Image: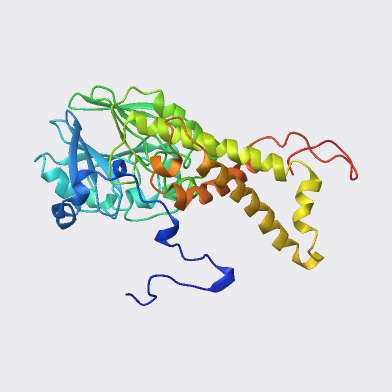
Amino acid sequence: MGKYGDFYEIGPWGFSKASPEDHAPSPKQFQPEHLSDPKFYEKGYHVEELGDGVHWVTSPSGYDAAFVTTGSGVIAIDAPPTLGENMLAAIESVTDEPVTHVIYSHWHSDHIGAAAMYGPDVKIVAHEITRELLARFPDPLRPLPTETFSTDETLDVGGVRLELSYKGADHCPGNIYIYAPRQKVLTKIDIVSPGSVTFMYCDASENISGWLQAHDQILEYDFNALVGGHIMRYGTREDVITSREYFHDLQSSADEAIAEMSSTMDARMEFYASLSADQVLVGTENWINSMVNYATEKTLNKVTSNGQKWPERLAGATVWTKNHAYTVVEATRLERTHNGYQQRGAGGPEYIV
């Protein structure tokens, strides 16, 4: 046990400790064979070829990345710091080619925070917003891109082609699609975590409408394998379809919760009825959390398209659905119509409060 035991408890002001007894175990399909191989943990990485030179690398930390051998140098995609130089070891286990190009999927340090290890001579390709953000918040471990693009770009190294595309903000501004058309491998980071409901709060994404839309945009590609950035397995088309269904169910449940508790001022004010004026924020917390609980319950109890409930289909469903529900409820308030607005005085039509 460490300095703080297995949890830092502060009572009613903080988060309560999660108990394994309260949560469903991860489905078996979430756990690939290499997780049971001691060599995975000894080496610190696992590498697989997904298609004619396109390789996927993952780590015990749960972060993954990719690289492509071209005959004229290696194209590395991302550099998660928790994978770090084990990414170089994975490349060296496959080829003697040097890394000549690096593609940044987006600017976040948890995915490119070890990029300096590739050395000063590599060409770094990224979206122009990624360069702008890295220039604004400098980090010597994330060197500035040397080449940028706006909407679409093709990177050709030794006759091996990667198609880069930006379709708008989703997880964050500048987060791009990286597609190997011949090998039918797509890299799109921080949208789908194959086999899981993804990390909490929709993977800490900034534009939830764009993040949900990205599921459809991924499915517009003809791919056999998806590199998603998190979780120790690569994804399939079916994984994306399953994730999309889960979040569509969650959005529907959130819409229903808002209709029940926020479509009239009277419905909202019920949460404040017993509170004094100096405790209205307690009522606000209870109001928002009630909508979140409603959406969470509806989602987890729904019988889905294959006859199972979500805890049977996706890892983390009972752990993180409440976090996703909060994000989707809040994003609905911020990013979608309120179906009207307050008229002068106390009267007026119903609208989302």
Query: In what quadrant of the picture does the N terminus appear?
Result: bottom left
Q: Is residue 103 visible?
A: yes
In the image, is residue 3 above or below residue 283? below
- Which residue corresponds to the image point at 59% horizontal and 44% vertical from the top-left? 295
Color theme of the render: rainbow
Image location of residue 124, percent across then percent down: 30, 40
288 relative position to 134: left or right: right
Q: Is residue 119 visible?
A: no
- The front one of 142 and 233 is 233
- Which residue corresponds to the image point at 35% horizontal and 30% vertical from the top-left? 238
Which of the 4 image quadrants contains residue 298?
top right
Which of the 4 image quadrants contains residue 351?
top right
Question: Extreme left residue here?
Answer: 96
Question: Extreme bottom residue here?
Answer: 3
- Which residue corresponds to the image point at 20% horizontal and 44% vertical from the top-left? 33
- The front one of 44 and 238 is 238
101 relative position to 23: left or right: left
Image location of residue 307, percent across then percent down: 44, 33
Image location of residue 331, percent across then percent down: 60, 43
Image location of residue 184, percent across then percent down: 27, 25
